[in-house]
């Protein structure tokens, strides 16, 4: 699956009973001209439960949520650990209390839920990357 600089919307399939952990794993290759890569976990009403925004132009990784078209408070702590033209892996585990995020196998952050984590229905990956792998379980 390749999406260079285009949006890639994929339905989030719930294989487990409500309340159990779900995980997302993706691998990609940032393009040489990469400015941003966004990974969004959305609810049925298109609210963004979690956005992980890799901002090459700002040298940071921003986490946030959006409800009724209003962005909430950003979280920007943590080291920017991606490089252009270098493969990366992101894993997001949906735990009852927070999203646990790992980048390239290392714990990056815990993002406390700002909405009911059972409402997730969709994943959207967009930006300047070649998306190589995406798995939901």
Image: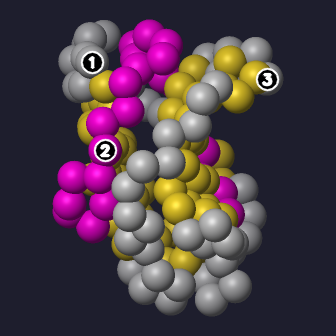
Image depth: mark 2 or mark 1 in front: 2
- Tell me, for residue 52, which label it has, or none: none
Label 1: state its secondary structure: loop
Residue 20: quadrant of the picture: top left
- Using the image as rendered, state which of residue 38 and residue 10 is in the foreground: 38
The tag on residue 97 is 1
Q: Residue at x 31, y 25 (%)?
A: 98
Colouring mode (rainbow / by chain / secondary structure / one colour): secondary structure
Disc 3, disc 1: CB below 8 Å?
A: no
- Res 1 seen here: no
Magenta region: 103-127
Sequence order check: which comes first, mark 2 or mark 1?
A: 1
* 126 in the magenta segment: yes
Q: CA distance from mark 2 to mark 1?
A: 13 Å
Badge 1: residue crowd in 10 Å (few <14, some 14–19, many ≥20): few
Report the residue marked by disc 2.
109
Q: Quadrant of the C terminus?
A: top left
Marks 3/1: CA–CA distance:
24 Å
Query: As drawn, is 11 to the left or to the right of 26?
Result: right
Q: What residue is disc 3 on?
A: 69
Q: Are marks 2 and 3 in contact (CB under 8 Å)?
A: no
| Residue 137 against residue 33 in the figure, above or below | above
Residue 84 visible in the shown view: yes
* Residue 32: percent from left, percent from top: 63, 89
Tell me if residue 73 is in the magenta stretch: no
The CA span between labels 2 and 3 is 25 Å
């Amino acid at each position: 699956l390749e999406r260079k600089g285009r949006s890639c919307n994929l339905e989030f399939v719930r294989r487990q009973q409500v309340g159990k952990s779900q995980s997302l794993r993706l691998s990609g290759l940032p393009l040489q001209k990469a400015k941003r890569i966004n990974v969004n976990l959305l609810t049925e009403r298109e609210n963004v439960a979690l956005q992980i925004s890799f901002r090459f132009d700002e040298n940071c990784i921003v986490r946030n949520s959006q409800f009724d078209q209003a962005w909430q408070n950003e979280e920007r702590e943590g080291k920017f650990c991606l490089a252009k033209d270098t493969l990366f892996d992101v894993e997001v585990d949906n735990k009852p209390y927070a999203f646990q995020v790992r980048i390239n196998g290392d714990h990056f952050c815990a993002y406390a839920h700002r909405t009911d984590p059972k409402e997730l229905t969709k994943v959207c990956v967009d930006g300047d990357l070649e998306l190589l792998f995406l798995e939901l379980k």
